[in-house]
Image (cartoon, grey):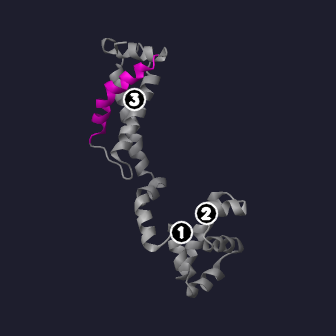
Amino acid sequence: MDYSVLSDEEIIQAYRDGKLDAIDYMIRKYTPLIYKCHNNRYAVGFSRDDFIQEGFIGLLSAVNKYEIGTDASFYTYAKTCIDNSMNKLMEKSRLKKNQILNNSKSLEETEELSEILGGDPEGIVLSKMINEDTFAKVESKLSKGELEVYNLLRDGYVAREIADMLGKDSKSVDNTIQRIKNKARKAC
């Protein structure tokens, strides 16, 4: 079907009637608008592709929620949905709960550092802790549960494996590891 001769409302109706190629046409038609909406937007921890992806999500939302027959044109509605979707991404970067993501290193940087220091990121901190001088200091400050996790970490197990071995959830073991690292830093 030649969608170029149809209005946006007719194309949306065709999509809702089961013509999936109609959505392909709308995506191609509105891709330039998504790129235009992206210009001059920046958020810590998010790339250009993240904004473009959010723009496509906004467009699909517009296609699904647009009420045919309203006074607002689909173009105006779609632009608003795309802008809102991208603005939500910018807001996410400002939230406190995402600060750790915004300030974190990429996986590649972590792997490079790990290779240089000889081990996984947990192993880097633990290698400092295993030093005989600090071992006694750290061990004396750990609770029974922390000591159990600590010994398994020293044996080379990772958090996920430890959680399975101890029958605990991963978050609990991760929290325990963080407490161990904090105590080790204070002891060093």
> Is residue 19 placed above or below 76 in the rendered structure?
above
**Residue 91 is one of the magenta-drawn residues:** no
Q: CA distance from mark 2 to mark 3?
A: 40 Å
| Residue where numbered disc 1 is placed | 122
Q: From the viewer's side, name the closer residue of 158 and 69.
A: 158
Query: In the image, what residue type sits under mark 2?
Result: Ala
* Residue 30 percent location from the top left of the image: 33, 27
Q: CA distance from mark 3 to mark 1?
A: 42 Å
Q: Going from the N terminus, do you reach mark 3 or mark 1 first?
A: 3
| Residue where numbered disc 2 is placed | 159
Query: In the image, what residue type sits under mark 1?
Result: Glu
Q: CA distance from mark 2 to mark 1?
A: 9 Å
Q: Residue furthest bottom?
A: 133
Q: Is residue 121 left or right of residue 30?
A: right
**Which region is colored magenta?**
19-39
* Residue 71 percent location from the top left of the image: 37, 15
In the picture, which quadrant includes the N terminus?
top left
Rate crowding at label 1 as few (under 14), some (14 to 19) or many (20 or more) other CA atoms within 10 Å: some
> Is residue 66 placed above or below 137 in the rendered structure?
above
Q: Is residue 167 left or right of residue 4?
A: right
Q: Which mark is residue 17?
A: none
Q: From the viewer's side, name the closer residue of 137 and 158.
A: 158
To which quarter of the image does residue 39 belong? top left
> Is residue 146 placed above or below 50 in the rendered structure?
below
| Residue where numbered disc 3 is placed | 59
Name the secondary structure under disc 2.
helix
Q: From the viewer's side, name the closer residue of 26 and 91.
A: 26
Query: In the image, what residue type sits under mark 3?
Result: Leu
Q: Going from the N terminus, do you reach mark 2 or mark 3 first?
A: 3
Name the secondary structure under disc 3.
helix
To which quarter of the image does residue 143 belong? bottom right
